[in-house]
Image (cartoon, rainbow, N blue to C red):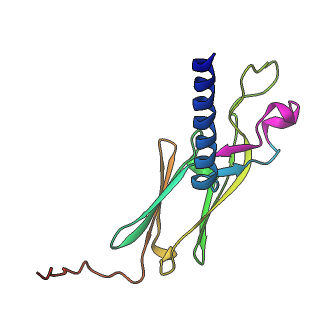
Amino acid sequence: MEPLKNFIERAWEGLTEGWRELLTRGSGALTHFGTEGPRKAESPEQFPHWSLLAAETWETALSIVIRVEIPGMNADDLDIDIHGNMLSIRGEKRSGAAQQDRRYHLMERAYGHFKRNIPLPHGVDPERAEVTYRDGVLTVIVPKTNTLPPRRLSVSN
């Protein structure tokens, strides 16, 4: 009985650790999808209202790079803009097929309208931003306005 108890405790610890990491690291990725779209044809409780739009941002000497996973969409379905230091991504994810005569056994994908905001550091130039969408990944490269070249530091003994 003791090995089973240890197994259950380890499994519970792993599960709670995963949820904790999701909430602390990925809470911004949890995105609400509106009720329009394919859910009109089916009862709303069969379709998720939330989904993860996982993102990463990093800084280079010249720019800020943002990548967001948004699979299953066309570039035309996305609307991207920058106001101040906030990148806003809006869109509509469609199922791509009529919903009649479908009986779902598993539905983990959310459809409908969504909006995701990602804060940017101050000092970016939205007018010169470059946006691409390839293989389900949206990439936004925003040049910095105050770029500093790397400075070599000397090490004292």
Could you say which quadrant of the image residue 83 lies in? bottom right
Q: How many labels does the image show?
A: 0
- Which quarter of the picture shows residue 145? bottom left
Which residue is at the far front? Answer: 2
Relative to 38, does residue 26 appear above or below in the rendering?
below
Asked whether, in this view, residue 143 is left or right of residue 41, the answer is left
Q: Residue at x 82, y 23 (%)?
A: 100
Per the rendered image, the range of residues in magenta is: 37-53
Between residue 54 and residue 16, name the one nearer to us.
Answer: 16
The location of residue 117, given as percent across then percent down, is 64, 63
The extreme left residue here reads 157
Residue 26 versus residue 64 in the image, above or below: above
Extreme-right residue of the structure = 43
Answer left or right for 137 relative to 106: left
The answer, for residue 53, to whether it is visible in the render is no
Q: Give residue 8's position: percent from left, percent from top.
A: 63, 26
Residue closer to the observer: 131 or 88: 88
Residue 58 as seen in the image, left or right of residue 111: left
Inspect the magenta stretch and tell me whether residue 10 lies in it.
Answer: no
Left or right for 48, reference 44: left
Front residue of 84/15: it is: 15
Locate residue 141, reporting x and y percent.
44, 64
Please identify the quarter of the rendering in which residue 110 is found. top right
Q: Residue at x 60, y 55 (%)?
A: 24
Q: Is residue 142 above or below residue 155?
A: above
